[in-house]
Image (cartoon, helix red, strand yellow):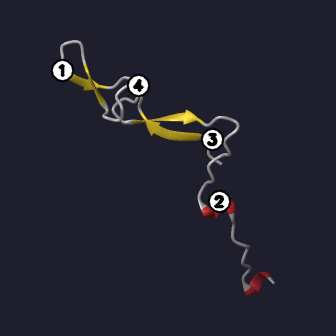
């Protein structure tokens, strides 16, 4: 189960760049230009389920030689 969630970066508002000291656009130092950051989910919110194959495994299939 995932206990984090990706949200838009609050520093650059999801743009990936911010205005630097000399009014040039520079890469955001919080998200490093990726535009998203991972935040922890509060304990009151249930964890985000993973892919279905992980949650619901398939039964083992035996070949005729193993029976």
Query: Along the polypeptide, which appears first: circle 4 or circle 2?
Result: 4
Q: How far apart are marks 4 and 3 (CA)?
A: 20 Å
User: Do the CB atoms of the residues marked 4 and 2 lie less than 8 Å apart?
Assistant: no
Query: Along the polypeptide, which appears first: circle 3 or circle 2?
Result: 3
Query: Along the polypeptide, which appears first: circle 1 or circle 4?
Result: 1
At horizontal 73% and vertical 73% (from top left) the residue drawn is 59
Of the pair 39 and 62, the residue shown nearer to us: 39
Residue 28, quarter of picture: top left
Q: Residue lying furthest top in this view?
A: 21
| Number of disc labels | 4
Q: Is residue 14 left or right of residue 1?
A: left
Query: Along the polypeptide, which appears first: circle 1 or circle 2?
Result: 1
Q: In this view, does 56 lie to the left or right of 8?
A: right
Dot 2: within a 10 Å radius of its alpha carbon, few (fewer than 14), some, or many (20 or more) residues?
Answer: few
Query: Along the polypeptide, which appears first: circle 4 or circle 3?
Result: 3
- Which element is circle 1 on? loop
At horizontal 49% and vertical 40% (from top left) the residue drawn is 6
Residue 24, compared with residue 67, is above or below; it is: above
Residue 45, compared with residue 30, is above or below; it is: below
Provide the residue designation for mark 4.
Answer: 30
Q: Position of residue 67 (x, y in %)?
A: 81, 84
Provide the residue designation for mark 1.
Answer: 24
At horizontal 36% and vertical 29% (from top left) the residue drawn is 32
């Amino acid at each position: 189960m995932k206990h984090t969630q990706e949200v838009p970066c609050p520093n650059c508002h999801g743009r990936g760049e911010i205005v630097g000291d000399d009014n040039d656009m520079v890469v955001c130092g919080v998200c490093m230009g990726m535009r998203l950051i991972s935040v922890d989910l509060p304990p009151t919110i249930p964890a985000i389920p993973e892919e279905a194959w992980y949650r619901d495994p398939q039964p083992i299939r035996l070949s005729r030689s193993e029976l």
